[in-house]
Image (cartoon, helix red, strand yellow):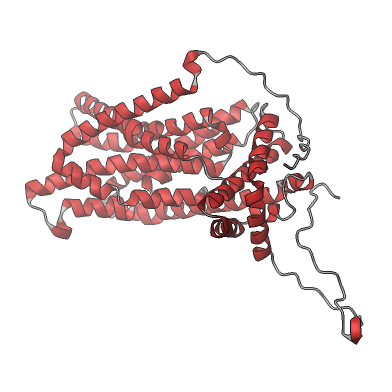
Amino acid sequence: MATCPPYPMHPSGPADGAPRHAHWWQQRWVRYGALTTLLALSGLVILALVREQTGTEGFLVGLGLAVLPVPLLIAAFRWLDRVEPGPWPNMLFAFAWGACAAALIAIVANSFATKWIATATADPAGADTLGATVIAPVVEESAKAAAVLLLFLFRGRDFTGIVDGVVIAGVTATGFAFTENILYLGTAFGTDQLTGGRGIASVTAATFFVRVVMSPFAHPLFTVLTGIGFGVAARCGDRQHVRRVLLPLSGLLLAMSMHAFWNGSSTFGDYGFFAVYGAFMVPAFGLLTWLVIWTRQRELRTVREELPAYAAAGWLAPAEPFALGSMRARRLAREYAGHHFGKPAARAVAQYEAYATSLAFLRHRGRRGRAGADFVVRERELLHELWRRREVARPALDHAARATAPPVPVAAGPWPVYGVYGYPAAPYPPYNPYTPYNPYRS
């Protein structure tokens, strides 16, 4: 077995944290069990509440229609997260929190607040408007932000930047919108059953068009602002306490404001909804999409800039930083491994790519003085995970690097150089695009 290369020196050299004894309530299985129980109970209660309001038939219709945009939204957020894919358990938790816990908090709190306002003001119509434009945005965005906060606090290793915040927030909001759509579509179906509405003129069709066709991204768009706040805070140093608090709060306030503006569009006249949708929601969606894609390109550039230090130390092959910094090369590497060695090899290459990306981000934070006290431990963990998979991953990544390397033109000399038997020979030695790059060379 090959000997591991020496570890590269940490740029800022934090000390290892001393292990601490964990009490029984701090054990992982206790926390997971309590969280799973909480989400399961929330799911049962929200299921009963929605079914009570919509009826069994309305619930089934609402469920069948509300589930349609979910796979597309999850796939979109997973696509954004391809550079450093987050663990599936985090995604499942975020969706479950949004669909169960956040939805339950919103239904109970919104209903209580609206009834209290109606009783206090003796104006039910005004209470509904105030509840939709003021109470609902505050309650719902706070409930969804709780999932992002929990992962930010307890899964900090998986929460390293803006893209992570966007993905977690978006998946949480997708789960919330899923439950809310069941309620709205099921209620609309019940209204059609009473009034005899049919076809495209039915309340169900109108609700489906507005909530599922026109604005499936509405809730994710609001909560993504909170996720961006947490993502920027994750890039701050551990000692920047004020920024790590104010940035998420600022994102949450922006999410509440946008949510309130969207909910209040129905009070802007007959065409207020369409005006807000076209002049505000669609441009905001396009701007945030551009921001996330641009951030993802910056992440790839970080991979290309940080990994050469590990290639120089012998942990990576010379061509790997180039291949790992290209999404096309990564895909080709997985396909090559799967074609020649089978699906387990393709999964190993995908894991290798994810660990290498985490390593690049870790070193980037270290060079900027933002690494935590567990930098050395985490670095060694990632390097050993890479070393375990190198025999499968290196040939695949080398193939991908050669397949995607840009062509380099070589100019001819001013005079011919003759080789054997008088035929012209190559004026220069073959170009090697995989020479190790030294980021510290002047």
Asked if residue 162 lies left or right of residue 44, the reply is: right
Q: Is residue 401 above or below residue 424?
A: above
Q: Is residue 293 above or below residue 106?
A: below
Q: Is residue 248 visible?
A: yes
x and y, in percent, of residue 57 in the image: 14, 43
Which quadrant of the figure has residue 183?
A: top left
Is residue 232 or residue 307 the one in the foreground? 307
Which quadrant of the figure has residue 123?
A: top left
Residue at 23%, 50% (x, y): give it.
Answer: 207
Asked if residue 99 lies left or right of residue 8, the reply is: left
x and y, in percent, of residue 83 in the image: 57, 49
Asked if residue 254 lies left or right of residue 7, the reply is: left
Q: Is residue 288 visible?
A: no
Residue furthest to the bottom in view is: 422
Q: Quadrant of the N terminus?
A: top right
Residue at 78%, 63% (x, y): give it.
Answer: 432
Is residue 134 or residue 150 the one in the foreground? 150
Asked if residue 392 lies left or right of residue 75, the reply is: right
Residue furthest to the front in view is: 1
Residue at 71%, 36% (x, y): give it.
Answer: 366
Q: How many marks?
A: 0
x and y, in percent, of residue 274 in the image: 32, 55
Which quadrant of the figure has residue 178?
A: top left
Q: Is residue 23 above or below residue 314?
A: above
